[in-house]
Amino acid sequence: MQGKRILLIVGGGIAAYKALELVRLIRGAGASVRAILTAAGEKFVTPLSLASLTGDKVYTDLFSLTDEAEMGHIELSRDADLLVVAPATANLMARMAAGIADDLATTALLATDKPVLCAPAMNVRMWQHPATRRNVETLQRDGIAFVGPDAGEMACGEFGPGRLAEPAAILAAIREHFAGRAPTGALSGVRVLVTAGPTHEPIDPVRYIANRSSGKQGYAIAAAAAAAGADVILVSGPVGLPDPAGVTTIRVETAREMLAAVEGALPADVGIFAAAVADWRVETEGGQKIKKQKGAAPPALALAENPDILATIAGGAKRPRLVIGFAAETEKVIEHATAKRQRKQADWILANDVSPDTGVMGGDANTIHLVGAGGVDSWPQMSKIEVAERLVARIAAALAQSPRA
Ligand code: C5P
């Protein structure tokens, strides 16, 4: 978070005093804070206390000529790396959802091109009201992230969800945002199926055809999805990795076993096909070890094509809502991945260059190009664990934008 700039919008609620503690925590983590205080917010905390803690001027008035001369509201909203609304009141969220810009806070929120994190706080009945439910759903569809509210005793004496998340939890959500990780619980209630590792295709009882997949990327994805609260089933080929914690792991050997296990694990909301499935198997597996015979020609191995698991599931009746495949290429990475996305009917293909000099096969780092319907998003080189976390964050955002029918 070092050097990041946060624009904190403080709405009018009894929890507004916690925004002061939040400012302290954010600055302690190395980021700077500029604050907008709504008119209702001013009833709970003063501009002076916020200014003292942010070490900056506090912005309150859309029509202040001096403010506009020094820093226009557009610039104010775009100068930040992240906008945090805490507390986000029912009224503020309703205006955000409707695109109303009738004060400095809502104008900045409408004018911004930066990500927004909302920390709601309100009475439990207001939080549960269908109007607020609708507004939260709309904001989530617009890509706005949420932290909290917590459940507990409220200032008004009632009990239930509606309390502002603790400042430390809001800080954690801000950190997760900058780390590219999904917020805690972002995939709760979501069933994720992951394939990983190579497959082994037997030639005879002691020999097999395989490839160099280590399973590390698929295992990291399964672990990251589980950490985000998903119900994860990992169908794994033979690898030397332990079962990830909190994940149901099914171990298989061959492509055909993998397909059967995947079909048995459906339905799922998300399917991530990270396995490096062997394209071919030996047509007839020898029942006994094939013996070397002096002077005889080497045995000819007739190969048969294996089922394409990703294509079968993507084109099948139980297709997950989001189907994600990988494309390990050694040349024309994006071109091949784009064609593969179409051919296999995947929503996204994560393409990576696995030429021997990249060290990706078996290594700990990866460089990904995410090919989707809207184009290509190239990620910098990062560890396979970071790739997994970023992918899970993207999945959570995509599911939030297209909630279950
Ligand atoms: O065609 P290619 O093997 O490059 O496609 C890679 C993608 O397809 C990966 O997501 C891989 O898991 C999946 N795949 C599969 N079954 C196969 C071959 C590939 O699921 N038989």
Image (cartoon, grey):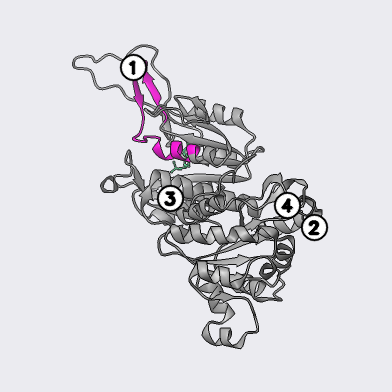
Which range is magenta?
A: 199-223
Q: CA distance from mark 1 to mark 4?
A: 70 Å
Q: CA distance from mark 4 to mark 3?
A: 51 Å
Q: CA distance from mark 2 to mark 4?
A: 22 Å
Amino acid under disc 2: Ala
Asked if marks 2 and 3 touch (Cβ < 8 Å), the reply is no
The residue that mark 4 highlights is 155
The residue that mark 3 highlights is 351
Q: CA distance from mark 2 to mark 3?
A: 42 Å
Residue 93 at what x, y percent from top left? 70, 62
Amino acid under disc 4: Ala
Amino acid under disc 1: Val
Q: Which mark is residue 206?
A: 1
Number of the front mark, 2 or 1: 2
Q: CA distance from mark 2 to mark 1?
A: 65 Å
Q: Which mark is residue 149?
A: none
**Mark 1 crowdedness (10 Å alpha carbons): few <14, some 14-19, many ≥20:** few
Q: Is mark 3 within 8 Å of ligand 1?
A: no
Residue at coordinates 46% horizontally, 49% vertically from top-left? 350
Which one is nearer the viewer's eye here, 256 or 214?
A: 214
Number of the front mark, 1 or 4: 4
Q: Which mark is residue 131?
A: 2
Q: CA distance from mark 1 to mark 3?
A: 33 Å
* Residue 214 falls within the magenta-colored stretch: yes
- Say which label, 4 or 3, has the lower sequence index: 4
